[in-house]
Image (spheres, helix red, strand yellow):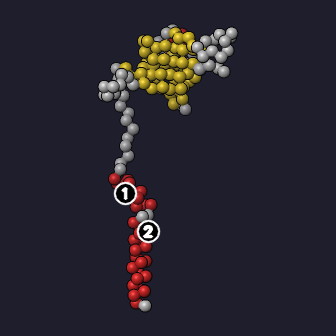
Amino acid sequence: MVKGIIAGIILGAAVLGAIFYFSPDRFIQSAKQTSPATPVPTSTTTPTNILFDSQTATINAQITQVSSSSLTFSKNNQTETLPLSPKVLIYKPKTDKSKPNSQAATSSADLKSIEVGKTAVIVAEMINNQYQVISISYLSNK
């Protein structure tokens, strides 16, 4: 009988120890102590990998303003302004009514062809440690 009581106490202590050891709070606290959060890099430096020729970013946003040297666009209530590359190209769907399924586009370097208020795919390239807009592509209104 005494052996049964002692065995019960030992078993109970082992169960309580296991519950404490495997509790989620302990795991969360342990993770907080051993793995600090990794910050998102915000540096806009050119990649150091010699295999990469360039670094680009693609944004699907609404164009809100254009000047001779910059483009302002917005997406999800956030606005950004980037300089325009001297070699920027603007792509628009071809308006050939005889070929309604045509996927062709016309390109232009004329900044007057940039349409404010329209959504476009904007491609920016890292040039001299700064993103510059290199192309603007308007999607078809199908």
Residue 130 pos. (x, y %): 38, 23
Q: Cα distance, mark 1 to mark 2?
A: 16 Å
User: Can see residue 88?
Assistant: yes
Q: Position of residue 54 (x, y in %)?
A: 38, 22
Q: Is residue 32 above or below residue 112?
A: below
* Res. 31 image quadrant: bottom left
Which residue is the extreme one toward the bottom?
1
* Horizontal and vertical percent position of residue 59: 50, 26
Q: Amino acid at mark 2?
A: Ile
Q: Nearer the viewer, mark 1 or mark 2?
A: 2
Judge the density around disc 1: few (<14), some (14-19), many (≥20) Cα neighbours within 10 Å.
few
Residue that numbered label 1 is attached to: 30
- Could you tell me which quadrant the N terminus lies in? bottom left
In percent of the image, x 49 and y 13: which residue is there? 89
- Identify the residue at image location x=53%, y=22%: 121
- Total marks in image: 2
Query: Circles 1 and 2: CB distance less than 8 Å?
Result: no
